[in-house]
Amino acid sequence: MQESAKCKICRRNGRKLFLKGEKCFTAKCPMIKKDYPPGIISKKRRKSTSEYGKELKEKQKLRNWYGLSEKQFKSYVEEVLERMHKGSLKDENPAETLIKILESRLDNTIFRMGFTLNRRQARQLVVHGHFLLNQKPVHSPSISLREGDKISLRPTSFKNKFFTKVPSYLKQYQVPEWIKLDKVKMEGEIIGTTNLEQTAPPAEISSIFEFYSR
């Protein structure tokens, strides 16, 4: 069976980014047998990487993890860098600030609520109008959420074939501490913010800042 493009992204980054949902947790995951970059026959033929290459790899890890385009991801990083240069971050950790911004996206929050298996699914479902934000229809996955915001499933979407399977999955799903979830009504509320320890991003964020500071 031909390896998918998303599986190659994980192999290229040398780490599972869980882009294929359930497949990532099975023996079918290519990372189990081929935990080396595509195009290289085996681990023995890996080449040394330059500092620029390492920074690029870390950037690609986090960008792909959140499923963002280069333009989107760059804008978030540059926002933090600008705040650093202006001194507006004060005692905040820049890496944690970036993660908080990325985690506050609507599509990511829906994924964190356990409604989807990956962020790509969440993004598509938002665009198709399946969710309400504070009881109002929403179609933009990039909306930044704040404490107190409430996300719910549109009433007409409960009968959608995709969502009929969600309640059984939610029974065993552990919701992040910064989200309050009613698993029966399928409604979530932002009750705080995340941090680096809770989120455990798959990349060295200081290298990402170095990459965009060149």
Image (cartoon, helix red, strand yellow):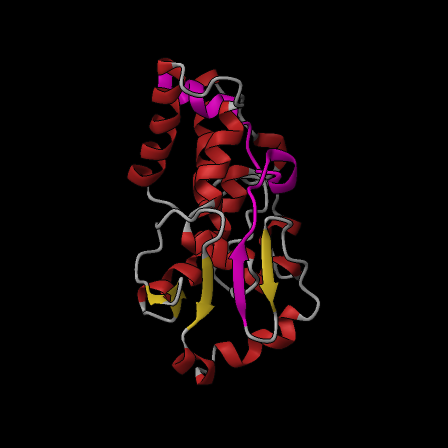
Q: Residue at x 59, y 46 (%)?
A: 16
Q: Is residue 193 magenta?
A: yes
Q: Residue at x 47, y 81 (%)?
A: 158
Q: Is 102 drawn above or below residue 114 in the view shown?
A: above
Quadrant of residue 194 within the rendered picture: top right
Q: Is residue 192 magenta?
A: yes
Q: Nearer the viewer, residue 7 or 128?
A: 128
Q: Residue at x 47, y 41 (%)?
A: 39
Tag count in the figure?
0
Quadrant of residue 35 within the rendered picture: top right
- Residue 51, given in percent of the width and then of the height, sits at 48, 16
Check the image and name the residue furthest to the front: 148
Span shown in magenta: 186-214
Q: Is residue 173 visible?
A: yes
Q: Nearer the viewer, residue 166 or 22?
A: 166
- Residue 207, given in percent of the width and then of the height, sits at 49, 22
Q: Nearer the viewer, residue 170 or 18?
A: 170
